[in-house]
Amino acid sequence: MLPDQDWCNVYPTAAPFKPSAVPLPVRMGYPVKRGVPPEKTGNLELVKIPNFLHLMPVAIRNHCAALKEFCTQWPSALSSDELSEKHFPIEFQTVDYVSAGPSLRNPKARVVKLSSLNLDDHSRKKFIKLAGSRYNAANDTLTLRSDRILQRVETNTNQLQRINGRLSLAQATIERLKGNKKAIKTAENHFYVPDLEQVPEIDVPYSLPDLLGVADDLMYSADLGPGIAPNAPGVPIPDLYKYIQKTEAWESEKEESDMEEFTWEGSRSEKSALETLLRGRFSSTPQEQILQNPTVQQYRSAELAQPRRAGGEY
């Protein structure tokens, strides 16, 4: 390789170390007899480890220049972080790692945080019930983590090279963004996180993803009912945000003891108070007026102030 050759053409994508293509006196390995480490030619230590020779500054500059025409200016109306959080309350936090261990799984990878969801009372309680310990009532934040299930389809440079032949990284990216039919489709639904302990309920052990011979990428279909199926790029994944807004048949069987918090409306305490007052001097008074009576309102406030355990019990 010539020293003045275009480096992006030498390493257009991620590739193993090639001693003939790197004009640098790289050495690596255990020094024998207090000598210097072995040179790059025939050095297996340099071949085994991952390298970032395809991400040199000049390659990154070319990549950014190719993507610039597809970028848009930041909206002038979102002049502060408060306005951005108000209009776009959902926040995604993803972390990518270069793993050097025997397993690609990382407990810190693929973390999704959702906050300030616009939910009604039914959806909010259902979401909290499904989330379990993942909901932090102190700051009203729901954090969903999925360290095994496929969350995003990573389109790396090797895939781009295979799809677009011998195009460079920048050219391959442009072809993909322009709608190349051969490009890999990326899953867009980030709300899919089935790792919610008791939900969805399926007739398999909870440790199913850890069993031998079972793929990690499982999906749950809210339309077809509880079930599992392999997930693949481009397959539509049910939206958990829409799923919690549906009223399932089993929710009609929910009793007062199953409630996450005590609700006065429709409770046994409200019915008992109405029955007692209707048998007395309020027998001819409409129920709406009885419930607005100061004595009943005081009793309601006392009931709501009672400390209760989960399930609505004292």
Image (spheres, rainbow, N blue to C red):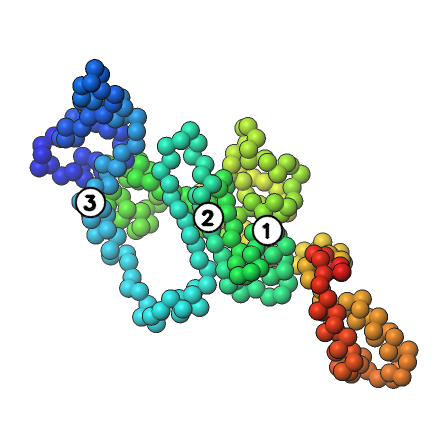
Q: Which mark is residue 57?
A: 3
Q: Residue at x 20, y 22 (%)?
A: 37
Q: Which mark is residue 133?
A: 1
Q: Residues within 10 Å of mark 2 (few under 14, many from 20)?
A: some
Q: In the rendering, at what x and y percent does residue 258 appear?
A: 73, 56
Q: In the rendering, at what x and y percent does residue 195 appear?
A: 56, 45
Q: In the rendering, at what x and y percent does residue 306 appear?
A: 73, 66
Q: Please indicate, yes or no, whether residue 41 appears anywhere in the rendered image.
A: no
Give the camera-side residue of 219 and 291: 291
Q: Which kind of residue does numbered mark 1 sit on?
A: Ser
Q: Which kind of residue does numbered mark 2 sit on?
A: Val
Q: Residue at x 58, y 59 (%)?
A: 137
Q: Residues within 10 Å of mark 1 (few under 14, many from 20)?
A: few
Q: Nearer the viewer, mark 3 or mark 1?
A: 1
Q: Nearer the viewer, mark 2 or mark 1?
A: 1
Marks 3 and 1 in Cβ contact (< 8 Å): no
Left or right, 292 with respect to 4, comes to right
Left or right, 178 with respect to 108, comes to left
Considering only vertical position in the picture, is 2 above or below 284?
A: above
Q: If the image is split into quadrants, where does the N terminus sit?
A: top left
Measured in 3D between alpha carbons, the distance from the residue under mark 2 to the one under mark 1, in whole angstroms, is: 16 Å
Give the farthest residue toward the right: 279
Label 3 SS: helix
The residue indicated by pointer 2 is 111
Give the camera-side residue of 239 and 197: 197
Give the camera-side residue of 121 and 226: 121
Q: Residue at x 78, y 78 (%)?
A: 296
